[in-house]
Every structure is written in C-alpha cells, then in structure tokens.
Image (spheres, rainbow, N blue to C red):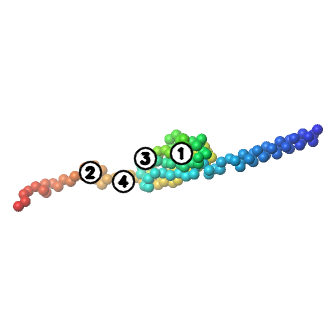
C-alpha cells in the first residue's frame, strides 16, 4: 500500500512540475509588452506640453500603462488602443527627466529627455512688431 501511495505522490509531483514548466514557457516575456517609448518634439522646454507614446504588443491590450517622470506618476494609468498608450506630459523643471512606461509591473521602457528653459523674446516679449522712429520721417522733401 505504501508503494502505491509513493507512486501516486510521485506522479502528482511530476504532473505539477510539467504544468508549472508549461506556464513559465507560455508566459509573456518581460520585454514583450512595452516595445518602445517616445516623446514628441525635438527640443523640450519647461511648462510646454508634449505627447508621450508607448508602443505595446497587440496581446497586451488588457493591461494599462503607467507613465512616470523621474519616478513620479504622470496622470492616471492609460488604456492601450491600436497598440499604443499616450499621455500628455508637461515638465516643470529643467534638467534630465527619465520618462518610463510601465505595464502591470511586467514590462517597461525608459527614455531620458533633457528639458531646457523656455527661450524669452528680447525686450521682455512685449514687442508689437512696430517701431517708433521718433519723428525722423517728418519734414518735407524737395
């Protein structure tokens, strides 16, 4: 009787191991969900809105994407549509910003963006586009 129980336990352990191995092999790979991340624009300024887009695989549409800026979450998690998740990001500080797209703690991609101060218009930005010539055009020709 003990031999029969030992065989049954051994068979159960073997079956469990086979199922576990199949689950591991069938599970999505960590890099298979978020394929890439991009930020719109070529020069990035403080207090300017940009679109952050994460490209994800078609099989991962069930999982929302969370975006972070230097570890701080940007908005709420975003649903995937047509293989993409997008969010608007407005940097508040200059310097390096590590923008990360994370999908359900399984997969992530990161891009580092350098943010610079907004350029200012010479003269404080109040130019109307006209010039005061100080009476230089008065007089008569002749």
Residues under labels 1 and 2: Cα distance? Answer: 45 Å
- x%, y% of residue 111? 52, 53
Residue at label 3? 49
Secondary structure beneath label 2: loop
Front position among marks 1 and 2: 1
Q: Nearer the viewer, residue 46 or 142?
A: 142
Q: CA distance from mark 4 to mark 2?
A: 15 Å
Disc nearest the viewer among 4 and 1: 1
CA gap between label 3 and label 2 equals: 25 Å
Is mark 4 in CB contact (under 8 Å) with mark 2? no
Please count the marks in the image: 4
Q: Nearer the viewer, residue 92 or 107?
A: 107
Judging by the rendered image, the residue that carries numbered circle 4 is 119
Q: Of the residues under marks 1 and 3, which one precedes in the sequence?
A: 3
Q: Determine whether the residue tagged by mark 1 lies in a helix, strand or loop.
A: loop
Q: Is residue 70 visible?
A: no
**Between discs 4 and 2, the one toward the N terminus:** 4
Label number found at residue 127: 2
* First in residue order: circle 3 vs circle 2: 3
């Amino acid at each position: 009787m003990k031999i029969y129980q030992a065989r049954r336990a051994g068979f159960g352990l073997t079956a469990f191991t086979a199922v576990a191995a199949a689950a591991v092999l069938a599970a999505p790979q960590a890099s298979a969900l978020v394929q890439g991340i991009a930020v719109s624009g070529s020069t990035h300024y403080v207090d300017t809105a940009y679109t952050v887009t994460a490209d994800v695989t078609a099989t991962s549409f069930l999982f929302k994407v969370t975006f972070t800026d230097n570890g701080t979450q940007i908005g709420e998690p975003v649903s995937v549509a047509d293989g993409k998740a997008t969010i608007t990001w407005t940097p508040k500080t200059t310097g390096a910003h590590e923008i990360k797209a994370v999908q359900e703690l399984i997969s992530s991609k990161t891009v580092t963006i350098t943010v610079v101060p907004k350029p200012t218009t010479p003269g404080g930005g109040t130019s109307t586009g006209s010039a005061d010539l100080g009476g230089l055009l008065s007089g008569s020709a002749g």
